[in-house]
Image (cartoon, helix red, strand yellow):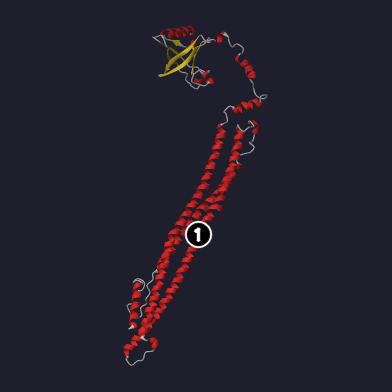
Amino acid sequence: MSAIIASDENSQRLAALGDNSVRSCSTDEDPILGSDSDETSDILLERLTAWKHVCEYLYSYISATAKAQKSQSREYETILKSVSYPLREGHHFKASTDGVAGLFENIYTNTKEIVKVNAAAEGNLNESVLPMLQRLLKEIKSKAKQLKIDKSKGANLLEKAWRATQKHILLLARSTRSSDASTDYKIERSHDPYLLRQGIDSRLIEQATREKVDRQENQEIQESFLWFEMHILQTVQCVLAKLFQFMGGQFDHQRAMYGDILGTAQLIHPDLEWFSFVERKNAALLNSEAIRRLSVYTTFPNKDHRATKPIIEGDLVCRSNGIPKNYHYVVTQAGYLHGFDRDNTLYQASVPEMSLYLADCSISPVNDVEFSVQGVNVSSRNLLNPFHAVTRYIFRAQSVEEAKKWYSAIDAAI
């Protein structure tokens, strides 16, 4: 009676451990093992590997950034060599900070500082940022290693309990087959089916307890991942904050140095260098007295001779070959009618576009504000014309009175 009660108590204890811990077998020799902790451990290990790769990618990114800063520092050293210091031919410029020499001294100093800033950024990334990721990677690897140890330890204990249970299940199967085959067959005490059944119940309880403990341990490990991942992300955020601090500070510093160069250039007054140069080189440069002496070139022999004075001059509109032109015309004492294009340069404006020798020309009477002259253009600009054809030039004055004045002057020269 007590044995039956013990057997019932074992069944109740098995039921209390839960149906998922131990599954029934379909045959006498099927294994009884119900834990699925391996699947949980495997997926958690995969997740740790994923986080490890995230940190490794970030490590590679920051490491490459540090190398770029080192390379940029060397590039700026090359740029620094392009600036001659002190400034070549510096004696031509004012020797002060507010002039061109001071500007190039400022450029040299700021560029040299940019070299240091890039080198400092590389050092900060290597010494302050990358070690944070190295420590985090060690923590992830350590947690993965511990998870593998716990998984192996739990699996060994479960396998041990499983083997002990299977051993007695097989013994019970053999013992019950012998008992069914012959009632006269003597069964050894240790193989008594009843005792074997009791032993199996005890071992099943032990196996189920072990599986339950293993599951609880894996549940705790799984729950610890929340805090560990929060730690990973907080560390990544801290790393990126450091990256922003160093790189952003470097960019701000570099921008400020370029701003200082620009500010120094903008403070130079446009006439500062010239007047400073004139003051220093006064002995070798022309002064105002020397410039006044140049007025001798405004006077020359026969400048005011009667033959140089025009008989009449002014602006007329001339049309020949259908093309009207507004030129400045002059009737000279030598008997020429010259037409000048005032839109040309100073020298070209003194060379007539048209020259008519009036003695060889004919003139028609004034018609309202117009009169015409027929003749050959003998100006130097027309020398390339091989025909020197007689051309009729129609002139238009601004008034009838003005047209009559021109007619009288030209008619007198003819």
Which residue is located at x 40 percent, y 81 percent? Answer: 167
Relative placement, left or right, of 307 versus 226 is right
Whether 285 is drawn above or below 2: the answer is: above
Coordinates of residue 48 in the picture (x, y in percent): 45, 61
Residue 321 visible to an observer of this rendering: no
Visible residue check, residue 363: yes
Q: Nearer the viewer, residue 388 or 21?
A: 21
Residue that sits furthest to the bottom in the current view: 184
Left or right of residue 251: residue 165 = left
Label total for image: 1
**Residue at 64% from the left image edge and 21% from the top image edge:** 287
Residue 300 falls in image quadrant: top right
Looking at the rendered image, the quarter that the N terminus falls into is bottom left
For residue 224, above or below residue 318? below
Q: Quadrant of residue 169?
A: bottom left
**Which residue is found at the position 40% from the left and 73% from the top?**
209
Q: Amino acid at mark 1?
A: Leu
Q: Is residue 278 left or right of residue 32?
A: right
Residue 129, x across and y down, in percent: 53, 53
Residue topped by disc 1: 137
Image position, residue 194 (x, y; %): 35, 84
Q: Is residue 373 above or below residue 36?
A: above
Residue 105 vs residue 87, the one in the foreground: 105
How packed mark 1 is, by other alpha carbons closer than 10 Å (few <14, some 14-19, many 20 or more), is many
Q: Secondary structure at mark 1?
A: helix
The outermost residue toward the front is 2
Indicate the quadrant where residue 363 lies: top left
Nearer the observer, 268 or 36: 36
Considering every residue shown, the one lying at the far right of the view is: 283
